[in-house]
């Protein structure tokens, strides 16, 4: 992203310089894992690195990036190889022009529905449309640092409740919503306003809800300013008008895909435009930038006519060939029914690689499934530990929790040896608990588990003053 003054440039340039000084190679190494059903145990980062683990339904992704410690000169571009079933590894030459200051960022939440995640084929195409609009609105000047769907939708509490969120009702853990984190150019505030305006026009037309980060003084992450409320009648009407031809029912067969390459502004917009042009739906998406390497992880439904025609397999292909094969298996219309696509080779994603596994069963939720509630975890430790699994184990030990899963984990090991991380865990409470008692039960649960995990860490030799741990079911309370 081009910046307007030296003050704005300094944090991004300093970060690039610090990493380059501590690295023995101009490339970042990575590993990618696609999993179905059971999630493998992830290893905390060794050396300066980052971990991202995402799960939705019965499938998910595990990413690990790290800076090489051995001097070397890897080939330029993106190197990716298959390492086994659903496992890939390689290296990416970083893009030094991808500059941003993470301290100046904002989030946008786009809501397609407030019910638990159970998309049909038409819903998956609406998610692709929303993804294209959000990434296109970012244009060629705004870096996208993170984008996730499904996520927890948000509703404003009634005015009678306090602004600290004490009246916020427990949210659905995963709903039809997209959440995007973008970097800002503080020297050009019009850019952010133009981006939100472009997304708002689309949201109003299709009945989608829109919230942006509340940037007023004293506000923290997880507090939202509502721009538009979700209009379910308009959404259903527009979905029928645009994609009424889509197959009926919910998908039971999907492909797991990861697009990987050097982080560049506009690359995700090019990928989103190509997917929509080929009528490829999205059941879930997780786009992240780890150490200036871009990963776009998506779960796409296989076209019903193509189910069973190919055996489960893993592939590692250039992006152009990969998208062509993807359109053959997952395009929901005949080739003549798709819109014309531009050449992906003429976009910032030209040298990306496509890592593909499937088909697999995405385990799209059933209507009678238990209602899962999100619990957010934030921590900082002087050593590498799997804090989310530790918290998860203590949550499941509670007599009022009947089921749960770790939906999202992101952790970074800094050069000073400290590990900072954030996670979201979904839990289902005993259905015998009355709905009005759920907030109190969740508050007691988070407080008790936080004490238990802290006691466990201190018993393992951690020093109290070096440990930061917060567990809360209201996301804004994690940041306070």
Image: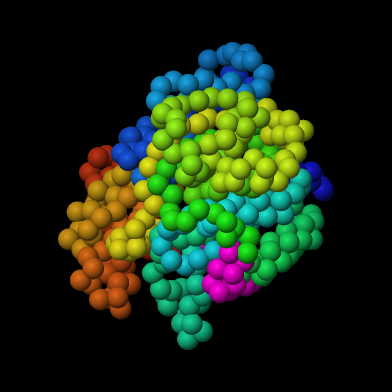
Q: What segment carries the magenta color?
A: 221-240
Q: Residue furthest bottom?
A: 160
The residue located at (59%, 37%) in the rendering is 327
Q: Is residue 241 left or right of residue 456?
A: right
Among the 4 quarters of the image, the one containing residue 323: top right
Relative to 47, say whether 218 is above or below: below
Among the 4 quarters of the image, the one containing residue 40: top left
Front residue of this view, candidates 200 and 256: 256
Front residue of this view, candidates 23 and 341: 341
Relative to 453, say whether 267 is above or below: above
Residue 81, percent from left and from top: 51, 20
The residue located at (47%, 56%) in the rendering is 248
The residue located at (73%, 30%) in the rendering is 345
Relative to 91, say whether 104 is above or below: below
Residue 394, percent from left and from top: 24, 52
Q: Residue furthest top?
A: 72
Front residue of this view, candidates 245 and 159: 245
Residue 257, percent from left and from top: 51, 36
Instruction: Assess whether residue 213 is covered by the magenta stretch.
Output: no
């Amino acid at each position: 992203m081009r910046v307007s003054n030296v003050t704005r440039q300094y944090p991004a340039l300093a970060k690039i310089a610090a990493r380059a000084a501590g690295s023995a190679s101009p490339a970042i190494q990575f590993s990618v894992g696609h999993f179905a059903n059971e999630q493998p145990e992830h290893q905390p980062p060794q050396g300066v690195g980052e971990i991202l683990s995402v799960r939705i339904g019965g499938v998910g992704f595990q990413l690990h990036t790290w800076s090489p410690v051995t001097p070397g000169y890897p080939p330029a571009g993106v190197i990716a190889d298959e390492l086994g079933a659903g496992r890939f590894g390689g290296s990416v030459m970083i893009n030094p022009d991808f500059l941003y200051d993470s301290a100046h960022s904002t989030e946008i939440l786009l809501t397609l529905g407030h019910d638990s995640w159970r998309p049909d084929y038409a819903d998956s195409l609406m998610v692709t449309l929303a993804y294209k609009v959000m990434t296109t609105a970012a244009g060629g000047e705004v870096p996208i640092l993170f984008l996730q769907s499904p996520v927890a939708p948000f509703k404003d509490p009634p005015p009678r409740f306090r602004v600290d969120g004490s009246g916020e009702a427990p949210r659905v853990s995963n709903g039809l919503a997209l959440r995007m984190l973008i970097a800002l150019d503080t020297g050009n505030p019009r850019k952010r306003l133009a981006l939100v305006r472009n997304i708002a026009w689309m949201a109003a037309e299709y009945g989608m809800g829109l919230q942006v980060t509340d940037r007023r003084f004293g506000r923290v992450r997880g507090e939202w300013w509502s721009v538009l409320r979700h209009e379910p009648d308009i959404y259903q009407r527009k979905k029928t008008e645009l994609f009424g031809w889509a197959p009926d029912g919910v998908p039971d067969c999907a492909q797991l895909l990861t697009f990987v390459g050097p982080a560049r502004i506009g690359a995700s917009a090019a990928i989103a435009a190509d997917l929509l042009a080929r009528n490829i739906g999205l059941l879930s998406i997780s786009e992240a930038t780890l150490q200036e390497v871009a990963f776009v992880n998506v779960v796409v439904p296989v076209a019903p006519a193509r189910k069973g025609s190919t055996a489960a397999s893993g592939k590692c292909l250039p992006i152009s060939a990969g998208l062509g094969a993807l359109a053959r298996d997952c395009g929901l219309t005949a080739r003549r029914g798709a819109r014309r696509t531009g050449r992906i080779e003429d976009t910032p994603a030209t040298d990306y690689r496509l890592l593909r596994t499937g088909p697999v069963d995405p385990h799209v939720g059933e209507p009678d499934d238990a209602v899962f509630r999100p619990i957010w975890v934030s921590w900082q430790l002087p050593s590498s530990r799997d804090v989310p699994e530790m918290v998860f184990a203590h949550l499941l030990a509670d007599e009022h929790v009947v089921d749960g899963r770790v939906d999202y984990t992101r952790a970074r090991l800094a050069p000073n040896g400290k590990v900072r991380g954030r996670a979201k865990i979904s839990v289902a409470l005993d259905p015998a608990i009355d709905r009005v008692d759920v907030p109190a039960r969740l508050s007691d649960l988070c407080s008790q588990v936080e004490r238990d995990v802290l006691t466990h860490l201190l018993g393992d030799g951690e020093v109290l003053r070096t440990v930061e741990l917060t567990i809360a079911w209201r996301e804004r309370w994690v940041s306070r």
